[in-house]
């Protein structure tokens, strides 16, 4: 089978190819599909102080993370001063409801005196084989230089919480 390549006028092959490859290497914000199934299996316990341990790891723009991510991996994880592989342990807030929506939240988390650049993050359950929960897409590279790098989680309510089931 023969197929023709349509390279836009004014763009050389190298630029065109790089654009196509970069679309494959992306971070897409999502609740991980495996997490949704594992919730129904009772794998994840978000109860504060007695539940599972959840962590958040930071990733570079070279990472490929999205709905199909099933577990934490160190591949393309951020490295730098003030950051340790595996990321930070999150502080759980016990799940709650509002109307017909259940939701969870985590306390904001920070890396102090950090010199790092991250494009996104993965929340994962370190109690259960580092199973993935959610991918966070920062929209662009975010950096700190000998400063504090903070992830601010959205308002914990039925419309905005980081994990919601409606």
Image (cartoon, rainbow, N blue to C red):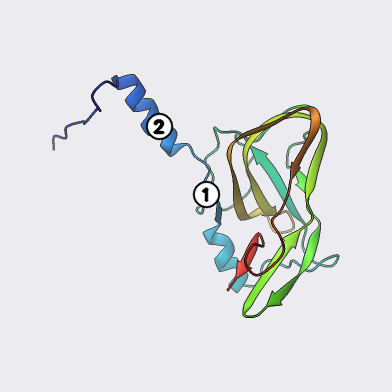
Q: Is residue 5 left or right of residue 85?
A: left
Residue position marked by numbered label 2 in the rendering? 21
- The residue depicted at 47 percent of the width and 36 percent of the height is 25
Q: Residue 21 falls in which quadrant of the image?
A: top left
* Residue at disc 1, secondary structure: loop
Q: Residues within 10 Å of mark 2 (few under 14, many from 20)?
A: few
Visible residue check, residue 82:
no
In terms of depth relative to the viewer, which is nearer, 45 or 156?
Answer: 156
Q: Is residue 94 left or right of residue 137?
A: right
Visible residue check, residue 140:
yes
Residue position marked by numbered label 1 in the rendering? 66
- The residue depicted at 67 percent of the width and 52 percent of the height is 123
Percent coordinates x, y for residue 121 in the rendering: 64, 44
Q: Which quadrant of the rendered structure holds the C terminus?
A: bottom right
Tag of residue 123? none
In terms of depth relative to the viewer, which is nearer, 49 or 150?
Answer: 150
Percent coordinates x, y for residue 27 in the rendering: 53, 42
Q: Residues within 10 Å of mark 1 (few under 14, many from 20)?
A: many
In terms of depth relative to the viewer, which is nearer, 7 or 67?
Answer: 7
Q: Which quadrant of the rendered structure holds the N terminus?
A: top left
Percent coordinates x, y for residue 66 in the rendering: 52, 49
């Amino acid at each position: 089978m023969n197929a023709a390549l349509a390279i836009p006028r004014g763009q050389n092959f190298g630029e065109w190819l790089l654009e196509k490859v970069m679309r494959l290497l992306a971070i897409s914000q999502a609740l991980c599909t495996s997490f949704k199934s594992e919730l129904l299996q009772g794998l994840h316990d978000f109860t504060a102080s007695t539940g599972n341990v959840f962590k958040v790891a930071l990733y570079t723009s070279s990472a490929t993370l999205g709905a199909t991510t099933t577990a934490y991996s160190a591949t393309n994880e951020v490295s730098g001063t003030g950051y340790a592989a595996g990321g930070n342990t999150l502080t759980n807030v016990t799940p709650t409801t509002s109307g017909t929506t259940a939701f969870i939240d985590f306390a904001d988390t920070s890396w102090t005196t950090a010199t790092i650049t991250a494009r996104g993050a993965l929340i994962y359950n370190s109690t259960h084989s580092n199973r993935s929960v959610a991918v966070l897409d920062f929209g662009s590279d975010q950096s700190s230089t000998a400063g504090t790098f903070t992830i601010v989680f959205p308002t914990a309510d039925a419309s905005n919480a980081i994990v919601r089931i409606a």
